Image (cartoon, helix red, strand yellow):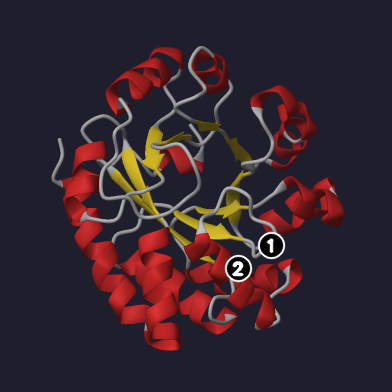
């Protein structure tokens, strides 16, 4: 079991997402430590990118704010390295193939190790092209976390069999963003994942309320929330840290309430 998979051993996991450098790198550091303190089991950090194709307007705007604030991949990595010794939960980068290829795959993963990153999620590298990334991750000891979507259907089994860390189950078609209702048959999707692998699975896209988190945890091993947190950061800026902390605590409590 990897360090990321181990994070699911103490009951249902809560996984928050933030965009690195939004509103600035110092606040990102504070947010990571605050979310950890309030029960986050794993933390996903988006590397700001000008064309984040899997993201809805909320996270697109966060990417633009971070880029305008001068955030670069190198600066984000340096910032994470500064707090590495204080971080006890696994950190994951969510990014795009172009960012990694431009940086140089080997060098990128080497730097991930330097700054305490345990896994990466790359939404625009499908299963059929995973060999572009997986061998490099293997060599670096970084988990390459796959996504399965409602449209994956018969591919779910194959994708899950190769999973490391956890399987990211995308709850809804389309891009990230808060949704009032999730209509996908999550039970059927997670059943297919669990038939194929012992690696945990977590559901993301559209979750924003404690009751939604508790609901998805009936099927999966954890819940992932991004847009609701990023919205809070957009609203409060540098003052968002305690608000995000309270929110994470409420979501973790909801996840933990599910046996």
Horizontal side of residue 2 vs 258, given as left or right: right
Q: Locate residue 82, reporting x and y percent.
A: 61, 76
Give SS at disc 1.
loop
Where on the picture, by quarter, is residue 201? top left
Q: Which residue is more in the foreground, 155 or 39?
A: 155
Other-residue count near label 1 (Cα within 10 Å), few / some / many at <14 / 14–19 / ≥20: many
Residue, x 25% and y 38% (percent of image)? 217
Residue, x 15% and y 39% (percent of image)? 258
Residue, x 13% and y 45% (percent of image)? 257
Horizontal side of residue 196 vs 11, given as left or right: right
Q: Which residue is more in the foreground, 150 or 30?
A: 150
Residue, x 38% and y 19% (percent of image)? 194
Q: Locate residue 51, reporting x and y percent.
A: 69, 57
Residue labelled with disc 1: 49
Residue labelled with disc 2: 63
The answer to the question of whether label 2 and label 1 lie on touching residues, with beta carbons closer than 8 A, is yes
Other-residue count near label 2 (Cα within 10 Å), few / some / many at <14 / 14–19 / ≥20: many
| Residue 248, placed above or below residue 140 | below
């Amino acid at each position: 079991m990897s360090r990321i998979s181990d994070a699911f051993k103490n009951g249902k996991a809560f996984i928050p997402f933030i965009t690195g450098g939004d509103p600035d790198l110092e606040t990102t550091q504070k947010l990571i430590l605050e979310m950890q303190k309030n029960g986050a089991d794993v933390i996903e950090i988006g590397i700001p990118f000008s064309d984040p194709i899997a993201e809805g307007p909320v996270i697109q705007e966060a990417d633009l704010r971070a880029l305008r604030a001068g955030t670069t991949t190198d600066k984000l990595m340096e910032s994470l390295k500064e707090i590495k010794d204080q971080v006890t939960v696994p950190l994951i980068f969510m990014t795009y193939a172009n960012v990694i290829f431009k940086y140089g795959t080997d060098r990128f993963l080497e730097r991930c190790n330097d700054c305490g990153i345990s896994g990466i999620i790359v939404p625009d590298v499908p299963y059929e092209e995973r060999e572009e990334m997986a061998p490099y991750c293997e060599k670096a000891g970084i988990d390459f976390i796959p996504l399965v979507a409602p449209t994956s259907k018969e591919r779910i089994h194959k994708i899950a069999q190769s999973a490391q860390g956890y399987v990211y189950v995308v709850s809804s078609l389309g891009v990230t963003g808060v949704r009032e209702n999730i209509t996908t048959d999550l039970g059927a999707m997670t059943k297919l994942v669990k038939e194929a692998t012992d690696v945990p699975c977590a559901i993301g896209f559209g979750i924003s309320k404690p009751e939604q988190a508790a609901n998805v945890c009936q099927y999966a091993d954890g819940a992932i929330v991004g847009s609701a947190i990023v919205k809070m950061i957009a609203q409060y800026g540098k003052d968002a840290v305690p608000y995000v902390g309270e929110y994470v605590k409420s979501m973790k409590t909801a996840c933990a309430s599910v046996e």
